[in-house]
Amino acid sequence: KTRLLLENQHLGDAVFKLQAEYNTLEQTLEQWVGAVAQDVFARAGRQIVRRKLLDAWRRPGRGLRARLELTGPDVGELPVLTARFDHIHDLSLAGMRLQALPPGFLRCFPKLKRLSLEGNHLSEIPPDVAALTGLYNLSLKEISLASSDTLFDALRPLVSLQTLDLQSCQLPGFTNAALETLAALPALTRLNLRYNALNLNGDGLELLSRLPLQMLDLS
């Protein structure tokens, strides 16, 4: 209600649009759960995620719950969302074994400051991360990222990003083009590259030295 009122909509219109948004979310999640009706474990996992998303949208209780932790290694994939979760500032999708995120999923959380994708089966940084311009902490720990010139392209708009965790990402190294992109992040002060088989040459180290780093772990 607050969001829609701030967008100069009348109370009646705001309530109507919120109810429509919730109804769509509920229907979408019911269909998503029903799609795995024959798989007991996947259905149970999706029911948990469904409940957490509905609870988060309704914001139960007096205080705004700024953190949302979705769990469940058996869900297979996340639902395609259209509802907005503007009040969520901290989102964890850690350990869900996701191979990809649905297009637009992260855009439903436009105010994120912290995001954990730790331990998923991704091969790249999801492109929609680029929409999270207020993000200051991103964990990609234990994700087998493929090294390429475009590895960090999704991070280009993240001018507030302070902490980037790339521990145990099985990275053999970085191309100079990728490091150029990383080195352009103006606020990055903490970079964890621990437990990667990195072999940085002089050019690579010089590029990293452009960052305002207070902590760099290459062990």
Image: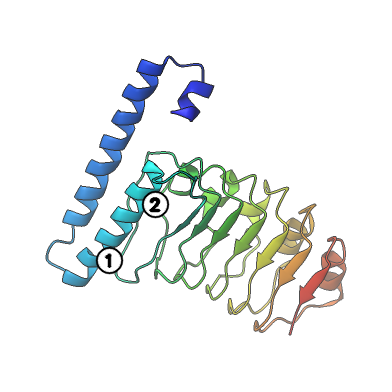
Residue 218 horizontal/vertical position (percent) = 75, 80
Residue 138 horizontal/vertical position (percent) = 61, 61
Element assignment for label 2: loop
Which badge, 1 or 2, is on the more N-terminal residue?
1
Q: Is residue 165 visible?
A: yes
Asked if 33 appears above or below 141 in the picture, the reply is above
Q: Is residue 80 left or right of residue 202?
A: left
Residue 70 horizontal/vertical position (percent) = 40, 61
- Residue at 51% of width from left, 47% of height from top? 88
Quadrant of the snapshot with the C terminus:
bottom right
Q: Which residue is mark 1?
A: 45
- Residue at 65% of width from left, 79% of height from top? 172
Amino acid marked by disc 1 = Gly
Q: Is residue 135 left or right of residue 205?
A: left
Front-most of residues 216 and 59: 59
Q: Which residue is mark 2?
A: 102
Q: Nearer the viewer, mark 1 or mark 2?
A: 1
> Looking at the image, which residue sits at the far left?
38
Q: Quadrant of residue 133?
A: top right
- Residue at 24% of width from left, 52% of height from top? 32
> Looking at the image, which residue sits at the far top?
10
Amino acid marked by disc 2 = Pro
